[in-house]
Image (tube, helix red, strand yellow):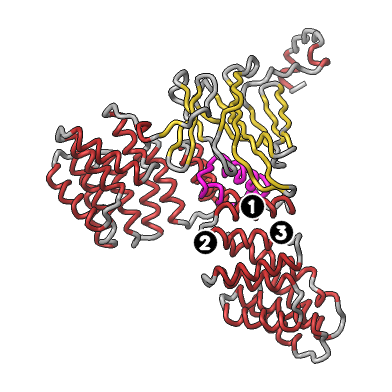
Amino acid sequence: MVRRLVLAVFVCGLAVSPAAAQSDSGLLRGREAASALVRGNVDQALTLYTEALEDKTLPNDRRATILNDRGVAYSRRQQPKEAIEDFNKAIQLYPEFAAVYNNRGNVLLGLGAVREALKDFDRALLLAPGYAAAYSNRAGAYMKLGQVERAIADYSKAVELTPNSAAALSGRGRANLAASRPHGAIRDFTRAVTLDARFSAAYRSRAEAKMVIERYEEAIEDYSRAIAFEPRSAELYALRGAAYDESGNAASGVKDFAKAIELSPNVGAFYAARGLAYARAEAYEDALNDFARAIELEPRSPKSYAYRAWTYRQQQQPELGLKDIERALKLDDKSADAYWARGEINESLGRAELAVADLRKAVALDPRLKAAVRALERLGVSTRSTEEEVVDAGLDRWRVFRKGTQYIAINDEFPRITINLEMMGKGKPRILEWDVKKPPFAGIAVLRFYAGTVNGPKGPEEVEQVAIIDLQSSTVVALEAQRQGDKLAQWTWDDGKLVVAAADGLTDEFQLRQGKPKEPPPQAQAKREPRRAKTLFELLFGF
């Protein structure tokens, strides 16, 4: 994502550079080079930039601009050393040139020099406080350092400055997903693909977010959209295969994993995933062949051993399965898959207590491991026993629990609904309002809650969010920003459709219920005269 943004920044820089506005021979060459670079002819651009720099009459600022642009070309040709040399020369000649710091920061970021890159982005923003691309790039650096909240703040600033930037919205979506805010991530990705319908990475990321909240069919649709733009991506087929597998469609999963293997035949993880899908489809011999191949390609991966152990369990060969579990745990004693498979084997052997202990360990290591959660539910064990209730945070029959670093709201009246209370800032959640709508929105409800305090331009600002819930399907439709400081969302409920102009500046639209059928136009309502029956002559000759 950062790479893609870097090139866009460079091209924009070229379009407005002082070099392109001059008429002497050196600057003319610079303009021709910029045009070649925009067309994708990097080699020609490098030649023309070098010729332009031979003009000894160029002022320092114009020479710096051409050096910056040649650095861009070198970066596109995967020559970071030469690119940085040109950026360094440009800075010596024109130290107040914000774009060159941003561009050098991007190259450094690609080389893994994250903290050095941050210094360059800081300098670019000091020189140009409204530089949206530099905010996005600095956010990418913060993400690499694991400073997710700082990344979200920078992405939000970039979105504020350039609200039609699909890249900035997608970047913030990735950060929200990393912060365990899947609904917030989905909002950002949806806006990104609305702005750029060919944004493959945003479809993929939205699918990942939908997988987190178990909207498997919607995730499959998004992976399919991404595949349409990247039909040679083995990873995308594997991801869609996993979505099919989770949705219970193992046969389609096998087909997608097979396509991934066709495109990348030496990736052990693809064979392991197809093996599990085969096993779930009860094609055990095919599954075992795939696990053998996966282990041959990646002998130190515990996943293949764990999956094969579960397959042996399905074949009533628990002893073989336990040997594979032993191998898996030697490779990684924190393998959630291994504990899940051993839990399943212990259950088959009638060792209920050992099974529950293993399955709980699996869920603790990986809360997203749905197979372990389902196994515990099958054994009649609630995973809620590890959650801590937040005192004085509920309302009516709603209660709030802390689950690791996250919070959830549950209500015994709606046992199939769990609401992730996505906190946006410091503090603990508190439910503020529960409202069930009346027709024409029967079955739709909203839950408003306090979502923490964030730093605003004038100091701390309280944030409230609203969960839109479809009680009929037991799903959370979306989370919307209701309030941030003095900013309040505007809600329009009309004819089955909801439009939310949220407090964070984004507007979302939801068709929640079937609207009233449209009445025909007045002229169509008028009583029509009965048609005269056609004569035989008219029927024969088409009159």
Identify the amino acid type marked 1.
Ala
Q: Distance between the residues labelled 1 and 2?
A: 15 Å
Residue stretch in magenta: 175-200
Identify the amino acid type marked 3.
Ala
**Residue ID for mark 2:** 145
Residue at image point 28% right, 44% down:
278
Residue at image point 64% right, 48% down:
192
Q: Residue 153, labelled with which disc?
A: 1
Residue 54 visible here:
yes
Q: In which quarter of the image is residue 78?
A: bottom right
Q: Are marks 1 and 3 in contact (CB under 8 Å)?
A: no
What crowding class fits label 3: few (fewer than 14 Cα within 10 Å), some (14-19), or many (20 or more)?
Answer: many
Q: Earlier in the sequence, mark 2 or mark 3?
A: 3
Residue at disc 1, secondary structure: helix
Q: Where 425 sits versus 439, above or below?
A: below
**Residue ID for mark 3:** 132
Q: Where 251 sits versus 29, above or below?
A: above
User: Would you say residue 182 sits in the magenta stretch?
Assistant: yes
Q: Where 354 sits versus 328, above or below?
A: above
Q: Position of residue 279 (x, y in %)?
A: 26, 42
Identify the amino acid type marked 2.
Leu
Residue 217 visible here:
no
Residue at image point 30% right, 29% down:
381
Please name which of the two marks, 2 or 3, marks the residue nearer to the observer.
2
Please name which of the two marks, 1 or 3, marks the residue nearer to the observer.
1
